[in-house]
Image (tube, grey):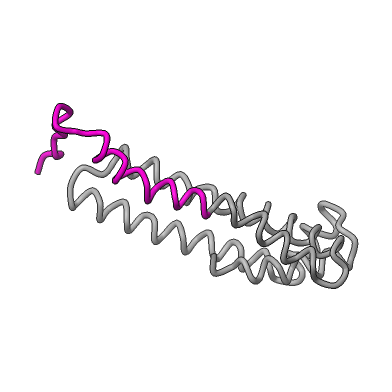
Amino acid sequence: MERAEIDLKALSQKAIFRFWLPLAMTWLMMSVEGPFIAAVVARLPEPKQNLAAYGVAFAFAMLLESPIILIMSAAVALVEDRASYRTLRNFTFMLNAAITAAMALLLAPSVFLLVFRDGIGLPSGVAALTRQAAAFLLPW
């Protein structure tokens, strides 16, 4: 099966806008998410420690999630037909499982303390809150 050819002459501004709008809304929601969550966390008791813990947990989650984010670019470059889609989908499932397992391993108390308290020097109170925040980010 060949890639569908796009008729560039028939492509109108309206068609581009209709295709682009849901993508733009998705990115808008993603960009609003961080400030919204930070605003909620800032209203919890001890906002400085909670914001510090959320920031550290989110940074580590993004670091671990970065290979999945790159899947979007890989899909554009590699998917040509149903077979290549399925191959990339199966790879994505495997990669997602491996990343989730790595994050779960990072949450094990001995590993967590080694990395976060001893490795990057988080105070004990912030480290405990960071572990809770990272646990909430595990399904993400």
**Which residue is drawn at the image coordinates 46% and 60% (left, top)?**
96
Taking the image as shown, residue 134 lies to the left or right of residue 110, namely left
Q: In the figure, residue 108 lies in which quadrant?
A: bottom right
Q: Position of residue 121 (x, y in %)?
A: 87, 54
Q: Position of residue 132 (x, y in %)?
A: 73, 72
Give the quadrant of the N terminus: top left
Q: Is residue 132 above or below residue 63?
A: below
Say how many tags the image has. Answer: 0
Q: Which residues are magenta?
A: 1-29
Q: In the figure, residue 3 lies in which quadrant?
A: top left
Instruction: Please state which of residues 59 and 6 is positioned toward the viewer in this rendering.
Output: 6
Give the quadrant of the C terminus: bottom right
Q: Is residue 112 above or below residue 11?
A: below
Instruction: Please state which of residues 14 and 29 is positioned toward the viewer in this rendering.
Output: 14
Taking the image as shown, residue 127 lies to the left or right of residue 17, namely right
Q: Position of residue 15 (x, y in %)?
A: 24, 40
**Which residue is drawn at the image coordinates 87% and 60% (left, top)?**
48
Which residue is the extreme one toward the front?
Answer: 14
Taking the image as shown, residue 82 lies to the left or right of residue 28, namely left
- Is residue 16 part of the magenta span, yes or no? yes
**Which residue is drawn at the image coordinates 41% and 60% (left, top)?**
94
